[in-house]
Image: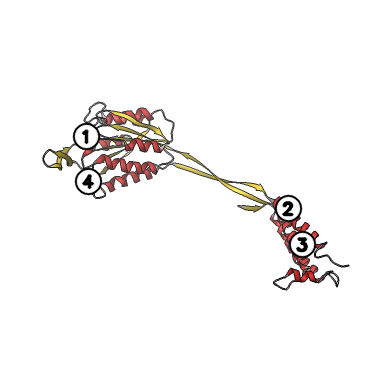
């Protein structure tokens, strides 16, 4: 990026035309001591050899004018400042998450597989936010603390397995652990995304009581209920027939999830398919936008000396040629 600090000097370029006409009419009758020099030049077009000096003079003037205009080379820099959002993902890994009522590439997969896939894409879309992961089953614990290193978050999320925190569902404990992790943070916005397919069966901390505590610390909670209610398909390993589908009862407390979202000023979503879950994460992504400001500035360096050096070099060449090869006889 190049600019000229004093562009009005370009008006001097208007003097170049008079210099050209004046130069073509000046000089004596005999301009060369030896006509053999003309043959050696082997010019492809008709031009008087002496006019080469005039052309060099004009080029010199042009470069002097360019130097006077103070050309400057600039580099553009962008400074990005962002007010990130702290996001804690609360992921259910209880036994019921192995129900295979979701599809991936037209094949049945369990609920946890889809939750991990969609959550990983959500993380990629939030590069300026700190994200952490809490897993819960019978117990609840922090799998990955809040961090901007989304590669680490993705690795921990990818390692989640069904039953790793127990077979039951401790929704209240999960909210409690998330609140403890986030309550003292001084951030623009603090949100939890609770993904579960069941009801609170662990009976440790009442979910609504945990939601009230989260609301006290301004932690908004989005609740997502995944899977079908009632009978859901499970893959079992039959001793005679091998792997087969068998339907079993699953508990789903939709009312509690709605109330948690209401108390914490969040929102409840129901996802019965992969597309619905993806759309839910997209909606949350739009609801919780990170404020990003980009300030652009340009740093300029003086480069007029380059044009000055070129002008002096051409002027020197003109003087040398004028006193040697193109010397004029008085």
Which element type, helix, strand or loop, lies under badge 2? helix
CA separation in Å, label 1 and label 2 = 79 Å
Q: CA distance from mark 4 to mark 1?
A: 17 Å
Q: Are marks 2 and 4 in contact (CB under 8 Å)?
A: no
**To which residue does mark 1 refer?**
95
Looking at marks 1 and 2 on the same chain, the residue that comes earlier in the sequence is marked by: 1
Please give the label number shown on residue 137: none
Q: Which residue is mark 4?
A: 108
Q: Earlier in the sequence, mark 2 or mark 4?
A: 4
Label at residue 57: 3
Sequence order check: which comes first, mark 1 or mark 3?
3
- The residue most toward the right is 330
What residue lies at 87% left-to-right and 67% top-to-bottom? 329
- Separation (CA) of disc 1 from disc 3: 89 Å
SS of the residue under disc 3: helix
x and y percentages locating residue 61 in the rendered image: 75, 59
Q: Do the residues under discs 2 and 3 have CB atoms within 8 angstroms?
A: no
Mark 3 or 4 closer to N-term? 3
Neighbour class for label 4 at 10 Å: few (<14), some, many (≥20)? some
CA distance separating discs 2 and 4: 74 Å
Residue under label 2: 309
């Amino acid at each position: 990026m190049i600019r000229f600090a004093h562009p009005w000097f370009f008006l001097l370029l208007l003097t170049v035309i008079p210099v050209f006409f004046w130069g073509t009419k000046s000089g004596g009758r005999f301009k060369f001591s030896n006509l053999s020099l003309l043959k050696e030049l082997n010019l492809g077009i008709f031009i008087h050899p002496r006019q080469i000096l005039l052309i060099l003079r004009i080029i010199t003037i042009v470069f002097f004018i360019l130097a006077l205009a103070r050309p400057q080379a600039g580099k553009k820099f962008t400074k990005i400042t962002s007010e990130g959002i702290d996001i804690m993902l609360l992921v259910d890994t209880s036994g019921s998450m192995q129900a295979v009522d979701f599809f991936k590439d037209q094949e049945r997969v369990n609920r946890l597989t889809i939750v991990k896939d969609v959550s990983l894409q959500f993380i990629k879309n939030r590069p300026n936010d700190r994200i952490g992961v809490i897993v819960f089953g019978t117990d609840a614990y922090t799998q990955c603390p809040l961090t901007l290193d989304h590669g680490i978050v993705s690795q921990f999320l990818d390692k989640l397995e069904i039953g790793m925190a127990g077979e039951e569902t401790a929704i209240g404990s999960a909210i409690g652990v998330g609140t403890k992790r986030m309550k003292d943070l001084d951030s623009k916005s603090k949100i939890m995304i609770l993904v579960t397919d069941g009801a609170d069966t662990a009976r440790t901390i009442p979910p609504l009581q945990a939601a009230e505590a989260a609301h006290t610390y301004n932690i908004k909670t989005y609740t997502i209920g995944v899977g079908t209610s009632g009978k859901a398909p499970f893959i079992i390993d039959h001793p005679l027939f091998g792997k087969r589908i068998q339907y079993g009862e699953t508990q789903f407390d939709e009312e509690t999830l709605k109330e948690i979202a209401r108390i914490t000023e969040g929102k409840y979503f129901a996802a019965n398919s992969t597309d619905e879950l993806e759309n839910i994460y997209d909606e949350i992504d739009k609801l919780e936008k990170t404020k990003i400001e980009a300030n652009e500035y340009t740093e300029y360096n003086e480069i007029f000396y380059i044009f000055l050096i070129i002008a002096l070099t051409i002027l020197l060449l003109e003087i040398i040629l004028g006193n040697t090869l193109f010397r004029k006889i008085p």
